[in-house]
Image (cartoon, helix red, strand yellow):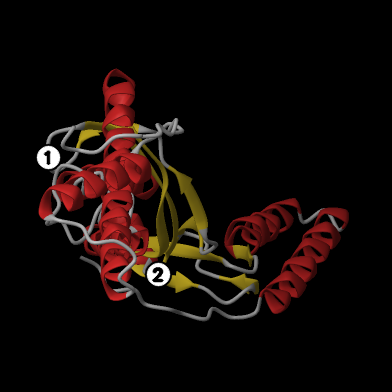
Amino acid sequence: MKTEKIITPPSGYAALALFIILVVSAGICMVSEQIAIGVIVGLAAFVFVLSGLIIVNPNESKVLTLFGKYVGTVKHDGFFWVNPFTVKKRVSLRAFNLNGQQLKVNDKIGNPIEIAAVIVWQIKDTANAVFAVENYVQYVDIQSEAAVRHLANLFPYDNLEDELATITLRGGAEQVSVLLEKELNERLDRAGIEVLEARISHLAYAPEIAHSMLQVQQASAIIAARRLIVEGAVGMVEMALIKLSEKNIVELDEERKAAMVSNLLVVLCGDKSVSPVVNTGTLYH
């Protein structure tokens, strides 16, 4: 890989003044009928002076090569003059946004999911960006897609099927973004590119399993709610029995306690309103 070399060429204003002087001199020679000299001076002004003038805008650079050899990179904005025979390639130093397309991949468990990422990147080494890869924009696009696919294979979508998972694509957005940014920087370092930010912008189950996974999530939520209701109901029944025993309101044998517990659990855990039944007899008649 090439090592970036930053250079500062001479000011272009002096070269522009020389160009004007040469053009005026060529005109004077033509008027004085010294046509050959005028043509030579005019050609020298355009070929050796004018063609070497370059303008570098803010957050831009010019990569210079002379007869196939890397000369250096002009990163300072301004008006300069360089060797007219150098090849000048403009390279932007601005930050780029890559809005990745939605990819259909399998997560760690094997469930098909749709995932996409937004990546902010910029060039930090112009020499590597120009000479190490064929097309650095295309290189970023392809490597970003590969990194997102690899990341999706490392983690499950959520922990419904993998309860031991500490990081999931849905629940661990911050950790996933950090890992994605790290992997992208490793992949794009060859091209002299730095990733400033990388985040998952779209995440969903694939359409063919989305309905089934929604049912799984709903079932999981119902089970969790029922578990909480049962735990609360058991606590309330226990408290009721303790209070009845402490205040000697009624003496209950084991069979009556079992009947009371059964009735209270039905009332407290049922998902429908209960219709009370008045018992005028006893449990034994």
Q: Picture quarter containing residue 174?
A: bottom left
Q: Which residue is mark 1?
A: 109
How many numbered marks have been drawn onto this rendered protein structure? Answer: 2
Image location of residue 22, percent across then percent down: 74, 66
In the image, which disc is placed on residue 124?
2
Front residue of this view, candidates 112 and 178: 112
Element marked by disc 1: loop
Q: Picture quarter containing residue 60?
A: bottom right
Question: Residue 45, can we see it?
Answer: yes
Front residue of this view, candidates 217 and 137: 217
The answer to whether residue 171 is above or below residue 1 is: above
**Residue at image point 83% right, 64% down:** 24
Q: Label 2 amino acid?
A: Lys
Image location of residue 274, percent across then percent down: 43, 33
Q: Label 1 amino acid?
A: Ile
Image location of residue 128, percent across then percent down: 30, 63
**Residue at image point 65% right, 79% down:** 11
Label 1 environment density (alpha carbons within 10 Å; few <14, some 14–19, many ≥20) = some
Q: Quadrant of the N terminus?
A: bottom left
Q: Quadrant of the C terminus?
A: top left
Question: Residue 155, can we see it?
Answer: no
Label 2 environment density (alpha carbons within 10 Å; few <14, some 14–19, many ≥20) = some
**Which label sits in the foreground, 2 or 1?**
1
Front residue of this view, candidates 175 and 125: 175
What is the residue that sits farthest to the top in this orientation? 208
Measure the alpha-carbon separation of dots 2 and 1.
38 Å
